[in-house]
Image (tube, rainbow, N blue to C red):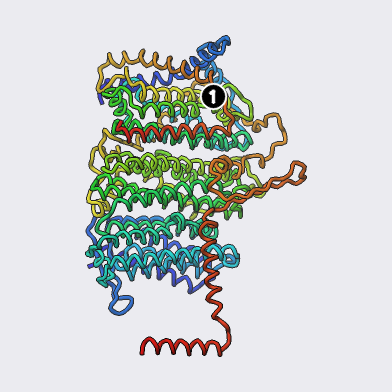
Amino acid sequence: MFSLIHLVVAAIVAWLAIGLLGILRPRSTPYIAHVLFVAGAIVGLALAVVAFLALGQSAQVIVLPLGLPDLPFHFRLDSLSAVFLLLLGATAAGISLFSAGYFRAGAGTAPGLMCLQYHTFLAAMATVLVADDAYAFMLAWETMALASFFLVTTDHRIPEIRHAGFLYLLIAHIGALAILLCFGVLQGGSGDYSFEGMRAVRLPGAWGSIAFLLALCGFGAKAGLLPLHVWLPEAHPAAPSPVSALMSGVMLKTAIYGLLRVTFDLLHVQLWWWGVVALVLGLATALYGVIFAAVQSDMKRLLAYSSIENIGIIVAGIGLAILFKSYGKTLLAAVAMTAVLYHSLNHALFKSLLFLATGSVLHATHERNLGKLGGLIHRMPWVAWLALVGTLAIAGLPPLNGFVSEWLLLQAFLFTPSLPQSFINMLVPLAAAALVLAVALAAFVMVKFYGVIFLGRPREPNLAYAKDAGYLERAALVWFALGCVVLGLFPVNVIAMLDAVNATLIGSTVGGHGGSWLLLAPINAGRSSYSPMIFLLVIVAVLLLTVQIVHRHYRGGLREGPAWDCGFPKQTPRMQDTAEGFGQPIRQIFEQFFRMQRSLPSPFDSAPRYKVSIEDHFWYWLYLPVARGAERLARLIGLIQQGRISVYLTYSFFTLLALLLFVR
Amino acid sequence: MSPAALLSQLLQLAIAMLLAPLLLGWVNQCRAWLQNKSAPSILLPYRLIRKLFHKDAVVAVNASPIFRITPYIVFAAMALAAAIVPSLATDLPFARVADAIALVGLFALARVFIALAAMDIGTAFGSMGARREMFVGFLAEPALLMVLFTASLISGSTSLPTIVDSLAHSEIAIYPSLAFAGVAFTMVSLAENARIPIDNPATHLELTMVHEAMLLEYSARHLALIEWASALKLFNYSCIGLALFFPFGIAEGSADWLAIIGATPVLIAKLAFGGFALALIETLSAKLRIFRAPEFLGTAFLLAVLGMLVNQLLGG
């Protein structure tokens, strides 16, 4: 009898098979793009449907006789896995569809090889989400890291891209080590590395905290938490856009999944101060990410920093959920957990949408620098209008989806005062202030992103020849934009879906406390309510009514004319605000956050150039000292390396002598 | 939904739409008096809107549809906000659609659209205005949210009618936290409505303008809608302030028809007083340099956070 988990395994195998089919004809772009990637998209869609059906069902387990002898793979499909599989499937479907229209034969990796890497990456992520023992989990986790490393370095002939890839690989491995140690702690001396065994272990005292901190460090490295965030802004611009979308939209979420799995499922109890740690770290990450996003002038770096911000918000939500759960306030913990899951879904949708849109822009203009774009809404209307949906959603504006998760998170914040500890109650206003500051800054960032790329006049003459995206790319963008709208307008249905996770992890549900399918009211309708559908309907109704009235009663005509030049006829498109200009206020206010170098031209310069470079303090505070330390250590060890056989024989002799002395 | 609730909803919306330009005219008139100038007619904003509706619109050649649809979106957003904020009665059918957080989101939606429209033409002033508006917004929006949070913490709800109900019936006459919030709210409202000291609605001096810089390309009916929406925004902010800090006189619960109609003159009196206070503040303060705006708004934000902290410390 086939059950849902068999179908998940079938999807994983199908992805691997598609990948292997790719290397049969590695140079045939039409075959790979229009056959294999489309097939991959269909598998993704099927996986999403299976995951949707699995939500709310009891956990299903299978054991596959794969891997080492006596160490089979355990797979398990429960509600938490299902939510993230749904995210993976739906996002992968869109991104694969986009890739089908996107990838062209280039100078980098052959398309067939890339197809293998891409589908291995997808299969590995799916395996991470269903793995039920540490061995399978780590194997899939490392496969995921390696596959994504190769995808990042598709254009491996460019040195910067190779550097970005190695940085990513390094931090991924630091994280993997922490996760491995975390599993080592979790098995609690029982030697049983299956998750089932870990759930049964009751870790004594501080060991639980050590496991949590290791998990936070390990999964935080993958997710981009401070201070292990530096790889994101390097790797995302290096990777091809669909890969950036996949990494930002889905891979970061596997880290969130891992953190939730360890904290709420494998550990049997949560302590309140873990929540504070996650909350503070998350908010610091969110603020840091969004402030850096505001001053970027590379569109993909900007989105990468924005991903750091969103991950920060999600981790802050996890912190809040831990805090509530540790004090036994399960309903509030469920609200926070819903916000976490909701925001994970949202971020997968709108960040994929925006990364893919930058991919289309990149193909049409060959330009990633915001300072050389502009006015693309006229040349690329499909991409521009669909990107507008993503922009409004990520800026957290009602009635789209980004607002719903932020609304839920703020609701959770407002309920914190019911906690017994006054220290935490003091923390809440500050935490809420940091969160709303990050969210408000995100709106600033996204106006800059959209306005500079798509609005205004083209800053370079060659932009006039930019072509809109092809049909497959458009279809993928529509898919994600539709997702943003649906998740924004039907929060009650989505929350009812996510409640399956709340029921298993927290033991309480958000739905069913008043409200109806139209009205979202997580605690009760008197406390707070929000109805995006009516919200949208009222705005649209007033809008149409106004248009009607204005057009019926006032017969003033409409003329087109040149823009007003303020009496200065020599206006050029380069006089519009550039990305640097738009970010200038932020650069000034948050000066301490950046390591900034500026060179200003003298007033008599005939060809003036303004240059500003902004770097991360963490490079100089943390990474470079560590790197220098490692180098010094290597040099010390290098002293014993003489390169002469006689010296090495002497070493062997003394080692033997020492061994004889000690072992005897 | 009772007929009385529907009536109060419609009456409130109609009053907001019709009286918003009057409030603007009243503020201008008070300011002229205070500055010892001869005052323009109080009906001047209406005449301006009527005049603009009768002109031919000129749209820049490279304007995208975003530019043309923005006035309608901003107007619709402000109209919805006017329906949500309890100014006449608390039993409003629409108030459950959006709570305090969604109200701030609604203002943000209008702001983002108007900033995008300003960048759409691609002139130096438009994008400068957009940048400054978003920059004022990113500090003012959190401060406004913090003010509303303080009130939410006191009343245990983010729904505006519940907040008003509980503030109007509190045993403690004055909440110390609300005092902080009140100062913060005043500062935010000045910034958000493009008033002195952040912006000057009466100037088109290039170096200082924020809000006006974004509207330079608008003309005729588009400009009329935006001017009307700005007046509505001022009206909405005034009503939020009145609802939070002077909640008396608002018809509560499922009030009868008489109470709702009785609440109207109270509202007008309160607005007249509030408008005078705004004119007084504008007369007594000077326009800040734009570089000083972060300090002003940062102070507002900190005061609002302090309000929340005080609320936690003193328990109200």
Badge 1, how many Cα within 10 Å: few under 14, some, many 20+?
Answer: many
x, y percent for residue A251: 42, 59
Above or below: residue B64 compared with residue A255: above
x, y percent for residue A323: 30, 48
| Nearer-the-camera pick, A315 or B65 | A315
Q: Residue furthest front?
A: A661
Q: Is residue A153 visible?
A: no
User: Which chain is indicated by disc 1?
Assistant: B
Q: Amino acid at mark 1?
A: Ile
Q: Is residue B258 visible?
A: yes
The quarter of the rendered structure image containing the N terminus of chain A is bottom left
For the point 29% across and 73% down, the residue is A64
x, y percent for residue A338: 31, 48
Residue A165 left/right relative to B91: right
Occupied quadrant, residue A401: top left
Residue A589 left/right relative to A341: right
| Nearer-the-camera pick, A190 or A82 | A190
- Residue position marked by numbered label 1 in the rendering: B196
| Nearer-the-camera pick, A160 or A14 | A160
Residue A583 left/right relative to B309: right
